[in-house]
Image: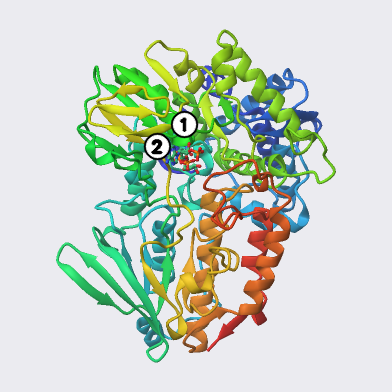
C-alpha cells in the first residue's frame, strides 16, 4: 500500500527512466484527475476532453491524444520532485478539491448529490462501507445476536469481513469446499471476468495486485482466498455445508435453519440471515432426449472435470451465451475438433487486451504513485456507472427504427456489424448465422478479445457452427433435426443457470409459514431494493431479485447492501428489538416503480428471450435503476418503510 517503507525505498531508488517508462502505461484521464488533486495545476484542468467509444458505451477521453504527453511530463516532474524530497507520506490534498478532481478524471462533472458515493468508490477510506455504531452496543445484547451468512463468494466474504469488524457474532456456511463462489465453481477453459478487474475488488482490496485488466478464473479465486486469509475468515466458515431450509420462528425471534454437512444434518438458530448466494449458481441442464445414452463425458460448464484431457477429442458445446463464446476459442486450442450448437446468436463486443496480463509497469504505478490506484479505481467504476455504461441500456420511447432502441443503440449496432464484417467478411454464411435477431443490449452483451475471440475461432477448420436444432443425444454424439448424426467424444452443456429460481433449492418460509413461492406467485421473484421481503424478517439478500447491475458493479451493490443490512441489525441490537421487515406497501411501491423503469431498458425488448426474462415475461434478475438510486435508497431508507417489532 502507498506510504509503506518498502514502497518509499522502491521509489527513492527509481531512476528518471524508470519513472518515464512506468508513466507511459498510465491512463492519461486518470493522471488528469490525480495530478490536479495533488497539485491544483490549472493547466492540467484545462486539457480538453471529447466523447469516445468505450466498450459498450460512450465515455469522455482526451480530445487530443497529444495531451497525454503533457500530462505524463507533468506527472514525471511531480514524481521526480517527490522522490527527491524523500518520497515520504503524501497527503491527498484539499478535500474541497476532490469533486473537481474526480470530475477531471471522469471527464464529466460529478453531481454534488452523488459525491459521497463516488468518494466511497475512490476508496481513500477502505472501511467507508463498514458499519459505524452510533453508540457502543451493550455487550450482552451483542453476544445474544447471531447472524448466519449463506455463501462464501464475493458477497458472503464481504459480509463476514464487515460483521467481524462490527463485532457482531456470525457464522458462514458454504456448500463448496473453498471460497470464491462462482469463481470456485466455474473452471471451464477461458473463464474470466468481462468487467474490469480494477473495480472487481472490495474497497479494502484496493492494494490487491491483479494480474491483468480482465482476470481469469484462477486469479479471481486467488483474490477471494486473499480476502479469506487477510481477514482470518476461514475459522468462521463451515465448508461443504449446504442450507436445506430456513423458517422464521416468530416466538423465538430467530430463523430455524436446517443445514447438511458431511457429518449429517443439523439445525442453526441465527437471529438474522444474510443470503449471499449467487443467482447464477445452479446449473440449468436441459432435458434433451437420449442424454443418458451418450457414452462419453457430458457435463455443465460449471462442473468442469479437473482431469479432463481434450487432446484430439471431438467436443460438442450446446449453448451460445457468454460462457460458450468465452470458452469455444480456448477449447479450439485444446481439443481436436469443436462443434458449437447455437440456437440464438449474441452480439459480441471486442475488448482490446481482454486476454492480456499487465506489464510490470502497471503494478509499479500502483505501488509508487500515491493515490493513483484510487483515481484509477474511481474512473473504472465511473465508466460502469449511470453517466456512461448505463446509458447504453436506455430505450428511447420516441425511437422508430425497428432494429434498434435509441440513437446510441443504433450506433452500437452499427459498430458491432462493422466488427462482424471485419472478422467474418470472407464468410457470408457465418455472417448471416451470427446475426442476432434482437437489438444489442437486450440480451447479455458478450465480451471477446479484439485479437482472438469467437468469430476468429469459427473461422478455424477445427471449429464448426451447427445451427440445426438438436433432436437428441445418441451413444456417440448428437443428432440434429435434419437427421444428421454428429460424432462427439465429449458434450459440454453451456446452457446457463436457473437464474429465475431465487434461493432455490432452499425451502424458505417467513411469518405464518409463508413460502417464497406464495410471495412470488403472481409474476416471479421480487424484493424491496433487491434485499428485503415482506413477512420475511431479519432476512437480507445480497444478490436478490432485480439486482443484476448495469449501472455500477456487482461489488459495489453487495457492499452497499451489506452496509444496509448491518445498519438494520445494529438498530435491532441498540433498540433491543426482535425483528425488522419491509412493509408490504413499501415492497409494492418499489416494485411498481421498478416495472415503470423496466420498460425503458433495452432488455425489455420482446425479441430477446433469455434468462433475463422469467416465465411471466418480466425480468426478475436485472436492476433497471441507476446504481446511484440504489445507493440512495439503501443509504437513507425511509423508517416508515420498515416494520420493526
Ligand atoms: P446463458 O446466457 O443463459 O446462455 C445459455 C445458452 O444455452 C443460450 O445460448 C441458450 O440458447 C442455450 N440453451 C439453453 N437451453 C437450451 C436447449 N434446451 N437447447 C439448446 N440450447 C439451449 O448462460 P451463460 O452463457 O452460462 O451465461 C450466464 C451468465 O453468466 C451471463 O449472462 C453472465 O451474466 C454470466 N457470465 C459472465 C461471464 C463473464 O463475465 N465473463 C462469462 C460467462 C457467464 P437460447 O439463447 O436460444 O435460449
Q: Nearer the viewer, residue 257 or 631?
A: 257
> What colour-coding does the image apply?
rainbow
Direction from residue 345 to residue 280 in the image, left or right = left
Direction from residue 44 to residue 313 in the image, left or right = left
- Residue 494 is tagged as 2
In the rendered image, the residue lying farthest to the bottom is 251
Secondary structure under the numbered disc 1 in the rendered image: helix
Direction from residue 157 to residue 640 in the image, left or right = right
Which of the 4 quarters of the picture holds residue 27? top right
Secondary structure under the numbered disc 2 in the rendered image: loop
Q: Residues within 10 Å of mark 1 (few under 14, many from 20)?
A: some
Classify 536 as above or below 600. Answer: below
Q: Nearer the viewer, residue 599 or 6?
A: 599
In the rendered image, the residue lying farthest to the left is 263
Confirm whether residue 491 shows in the render. Answer: yes
Indicate the position of residue 252 as horizontal and vertical percent values.
37, 89
Indicate the position of residue 155 as horizontal and vertical percent values.
44, 57
Query: Which of the two marks, 1 or 2, is nearer to us in this view?
Result: 2
In the rendered image, the residue lying farthest to the top is 426
Label 1, label 2: how far apart the Cα atoms are: 35 Å
Indicate the position of residue 142 as horizontal and vertical percent values.
40, 82
Indicate yes or no: mark 2 CB to ligand 1 under 8 Å: yes
Classify 397 as above or below 210. Answer: below
In the rendered image, the residue lying farthest to the right is 398
Residue at 50% across / 85% down in the picture?
A: 574
- Residue 363 is tagged as 1
Q: Nearer the viewer, residue 92 or 578?
A: 578
Which of the 4 quarters of the picture holds residue 269? bottom left
Direction from residue 450 to residue 179 in the image, left or right = left
Residue at 51% across / 19% down in the picture?
A: 455
Pointer 1 or 2: first along the chain: 1
Residue at 37% across / 64% down in the picture?
A: 150
Amino acid at each position: 500500500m502507498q506510504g509503506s517503507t518498502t514502497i518509499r525505498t522502491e521509489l527513492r531508488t527509481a531512476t528518471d527512466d524508470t519513472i518515464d517508462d512506468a508513466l507511459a502505461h498510465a491512463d492519461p484521464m486518470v493522471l488528469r484527475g490525480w495530478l490536479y488533486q495533488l497539485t491544483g495545476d490549472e493547466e492540467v484542468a484545462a486539457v480538453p476532453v471529447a466523447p469516445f467509444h468505450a466498450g459498450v458505451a460512450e465515455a469522455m477521453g482526451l480530445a487530443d491524444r497529444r495531451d497525454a504527453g503533457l500530462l505524463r511530463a507533468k506527472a514525471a516532474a511531480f514524481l521526480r520532485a517527490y522522490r527527491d524530497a524523500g518520497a515520504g507520506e503524501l497527503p491527498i490534498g484539499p478535500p474541497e478539491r476532490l469533486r473537481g478532481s474526480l470530475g477531471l478524471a471522469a471527464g464529466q462533472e460529478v453531481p454534488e448529490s452523488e459525491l459521497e458515493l463516488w468518494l466511497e468508490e475512490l476508496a481513500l477510506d477502505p472501511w467507508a462501507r463498514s458499519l459505524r455504531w452510533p453508540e457502543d452496543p451493550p455487550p450482552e445484547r451483542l453476544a445474544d445476536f447471531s447472524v448466519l451468512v449463506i455463501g462464501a463468494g464475493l458477497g458472503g466474504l464481504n459480509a463476514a469481513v464487515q460483521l467481524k469488524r462490527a463485532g457482531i457474532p456470525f457464522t458462514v456456511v458454504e456448500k463448496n469446499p473453498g471460497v470464491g463462489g462462482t469463481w470456485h465453481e466455474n473452471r471451464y477453459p477461458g473463464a474470466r471476468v468481462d468487467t474490469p478487474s480494477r473495480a472487481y475488488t472490495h474497497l479494502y482490496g484496493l492494494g490487491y495486485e491483479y494480474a491483468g485488466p480482465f482476470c481469469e478464473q484462477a486469479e479471481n479465486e486467488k483474490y477471494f482466498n486473499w480476502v479469506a486469509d487477510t481477514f482470518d475468515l476461514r475459522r468462521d466458515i463451515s465448508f461443504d455445508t449446504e442450507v436445506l431450509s430456513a423458517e422464521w420462528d416468530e416466538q423465538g425471534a430467530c430463523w430455524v435453519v436446517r443445514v447438511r454437512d458431511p457429518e449429517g444434518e443439523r439445525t442453526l438458530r441465527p437471529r438474522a440471515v444474510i443470503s449471499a448466494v449467487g443467482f447464477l449458481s445452479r446449473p440449468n441442464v436441459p432435458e434433451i432426449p437420449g442424454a443418458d445414452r451418450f457414452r462419453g463425458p457430458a457435463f455443465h460448464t460449471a462442473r468442469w472435470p479437473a482431469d479432463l484431457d481434450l487432446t484430439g477429442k471431438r467436443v460438442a458445446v450446446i449453448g451460445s451465451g457468454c460462457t460458450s463464446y468465452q470458452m469455444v476459442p480456448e477449447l479450439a486450442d485444446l481439443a481436436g475438433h469443436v462443434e458449437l450448437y447455437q440456437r440464438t446468436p449474441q452480439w459480441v463486443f471486442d475488448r482490446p487486451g481482454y486476454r492480456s496480463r499487465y506489464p510490470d509497469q502497471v503494478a509499479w504505478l500502483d505501488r509508487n504513485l500515491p493515490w493513483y490506484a484510487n483515481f484509477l479505481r474511481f474512473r473504472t467504476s465511473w465508466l460502469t456507472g449511470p453517466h456512461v455504461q448505463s446509458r447504453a441500456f436506455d430505450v428511447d420511447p420516441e425511437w422508430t427504427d425497428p432494429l434498434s432502441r435509441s440513437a446510441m443503440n443504433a450506433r452500437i449496432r452499427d459498430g458491432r456489424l462493422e466488427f462482424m464484417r471485419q472478422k467474418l467478411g470472407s464468410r457470408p454464411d457465418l455472417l448471416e448465422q451470427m446475426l442476432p435477431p434482437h437489438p444489442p443490449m437486450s440480451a447479455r452483451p458478450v465480451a471477446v478479445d479484439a485479437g482472438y475471440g469467437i468469430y476468429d475461432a469459427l473461422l478455424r477448420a477445427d471449429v464448426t457452427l451447427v445451427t440445426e436444432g438438436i433432436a437428441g443425444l445418441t451413444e456417440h454424439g448428437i443428432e440434429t433435426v435434419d437427421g444428421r448424426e454428429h460424432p462427439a467424444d465429449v458434450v459440454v452443456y453451456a446452457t446457463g443457470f436457473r437464474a429465475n429460481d431465487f434461493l432455490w433449492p432452499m425451502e424458505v418460509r417467513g411469518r405464518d409459514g409463508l413460502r417464497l413461492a406464495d410471495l412470488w406467485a403472481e409474476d416471479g421473484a421480487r424484493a424491496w431494493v433487491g434485499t428485503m421481503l415482506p413477512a420475511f424478517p431479519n432476512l437480507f439478500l445480497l444478490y436478490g431479485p432485480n439486482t443484476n447491475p448495469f449501472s455500477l458493479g456487482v461489488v459495489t451493490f453487495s457492499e452497499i447492501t451489506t452496509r444496509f443490512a448491518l445498519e438494520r441489525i445494529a438498530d435491532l441490537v441498540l433498540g433491543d428489538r426482535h425483528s425488522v421487515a419491509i412493509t408490504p406497501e413499501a415492497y409494492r411501491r418499489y416494485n411498481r416503480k421498478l416495472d415503470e423503469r423496466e420498460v425503458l431498458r433495452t432488455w425489455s425488448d420482446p425479441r430477446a428471450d433469455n434468462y433475463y426474462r422469467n416465465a411471466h415475461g418480466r425480468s426478475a434478475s436485472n436492476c433497471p435503476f441507476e446504481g446511484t438510486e440504489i445507493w440512495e435508497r439503501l443509504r437513507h431508507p425511509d423508517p416508515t418503510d420498515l416494520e420493526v417489532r
